[in-house]
């Protein structure tokens, strides 16, 4: 229930920020989620300034409509409140009590319905806009007009992620995306190195979230995702060495060394979980730093 309440307040605050960004009345309040929601507001403003031209898939439109109708029915949006009266003295007393509340309850119900409706419309608009802009900008690289939109969409995905496991996997997906961008920027030394720096940063953040979750839960599932990432990423990063300049090769080797360190940390943490060591107290950029199992010392 606390989670539902938090999600509802977060959605309502997002609606307030959208109103303010579009010239609406300022509410003069701040919440802890404002920094994360600011990225979503920025994406919304970019959508308004430069709407995507991608057409919405018919199947997606049909599925979205079905979801919205089901949500509206479940939340009671569009249902008119009705009251019943009872005959006789008891009914008269009930009518008096209802009269005292009559002007209040319908107004509250209407406001709640409008708020739910606004949130529902916002979710629908966001889903359509994000799907369109993602398709339009997914191949953008640094220097392209849509690249800023691409990175803003990634930040929005992180803000909407429901858990550290989800965020960790997103960061690893972003690291794969940065690798594709690096391949397109070969020959541009500064751009090539900058995007590899971002790739390594995304790798560290994703690995730190996944290894931390594995240590806290004593569950190696997150480590499986890390190892799968390292296996595929190392092969693809190694391909960047072919035909690279000396400076580019030096930079690529740094990324390869990071991937080797990630695999080593994942293996050490898996061993610590298998031999039931307590959760590590120390940590670094790659997450928890496990101790060696007694038999390995």
Image (tube, rainbow, N blue to C red):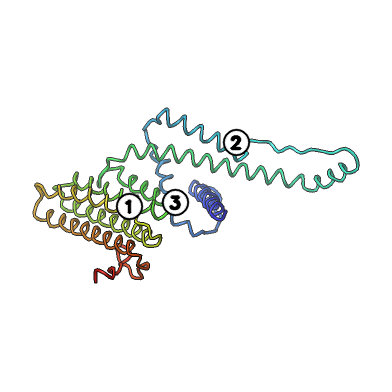
Direction from residue 120 to residue 253 in the image, left or right: left
Return the x and y of residue 74 as percentages of the image width and height: 59, 39
Q: Residue at x 63, y 45 (%)?
A: 112
At mark 1, the secondary structure is: helix
The residue at the far right in this view is 89
At mark 2, the secondary structure is: helix
Whichever of callouts 2 and 3 sits on the residue coming sooner in the sequence is 2
| Disc assigned to residue 171 | 1
Residue carrying label 2: 73
Q: Residue at x 24, y 72 (%)?
A: 297
Crowd band around label 3 with a 10 angstrom C-alpha radius: few (<14), some (14–19), many (20+): few
Whichever of callouts 2 and 1 sits on the residue coming sooner in the sequence is 2
Return the x and y of residue 58 as percentages of the image width and height: 42, 27
Crowd band around label 1 with a 10 angstrom C-alpha radius: few (<14), some (14–19), many (20+): many
Whichever of callouts 1 and 3 sits on the residue coming sooner in the sequence is 3
Closer to the camera in the image, 23 or 106 = 106
**How far apart are labels 2 and 3 at the CA level?**
25 Å
Q: Residue at x 29, y 69 (%)?
A: 291
Direction from residue 68 to residue 206 in the image, left or right: left
Residue carrying label 3: 162
**How far apart are labels 1 and 3 at the CA level?**
14 Å
């Amino acid at each position: 229930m606390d989670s539902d309440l938090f999600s509802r307040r977060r959605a309502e605050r997002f609606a307030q920020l959208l109103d303010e960004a579009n010239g609406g009345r300022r509410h003069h309040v701040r919440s802890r989620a404002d920094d994360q929601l600011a990225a979503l507001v920025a994406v919304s403003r970019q959508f308004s300034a430069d709407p995507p031209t991608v057409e919405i898939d018919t199947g997606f439109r049909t599925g979205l409509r079905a979801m919205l109708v089901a949500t509206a029915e479940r939340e009671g949006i569009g249902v008119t409140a009705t009251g019943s009266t009872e005959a006789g003295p008891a009914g008269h007393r009930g009518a008096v009590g209802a009269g005292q509340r009559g002007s209040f309850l319908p107004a509250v119900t209407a406001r709640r319905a409008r708020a739910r409706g606004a949130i529902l419309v916002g979710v629908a608009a966001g889903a359509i806009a994000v799907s369109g802009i993602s398709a339009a900008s997914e191949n953008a690289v640094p220097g392209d007009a849509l690249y800023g939109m691409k990175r803003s969409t990634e930040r929005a995905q992180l803000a909407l992620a429901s858990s550290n496991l989800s965020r960790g996997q997103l960061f690893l997906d972003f690291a794969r995306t940065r690798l594709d961008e690096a391949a397109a920027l070969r020959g541009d030394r500064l751009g090539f190195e900058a995007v590899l720096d971002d790739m390594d940063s995304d790798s560290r953040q994703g690995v730190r979230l996944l290894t931390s979750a594995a240590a806290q839960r004593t569950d190696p599932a997150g480590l499986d995702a890390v190892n799968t990432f390292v296996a595929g990423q190392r092969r693809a990063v190694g391909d960047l060495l072919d035909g690279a300049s000396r400076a580019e090769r030096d930079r690529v080797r740094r990324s390869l060394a990071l991937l080797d360190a990630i695999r080593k940390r994942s293996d050490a943490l898996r061993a610590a979980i298998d031999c039931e060591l307590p959760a590590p107290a120390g940590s670094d950029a790659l997450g928890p730093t496990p101790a060696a199992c007694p038999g390995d010392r």
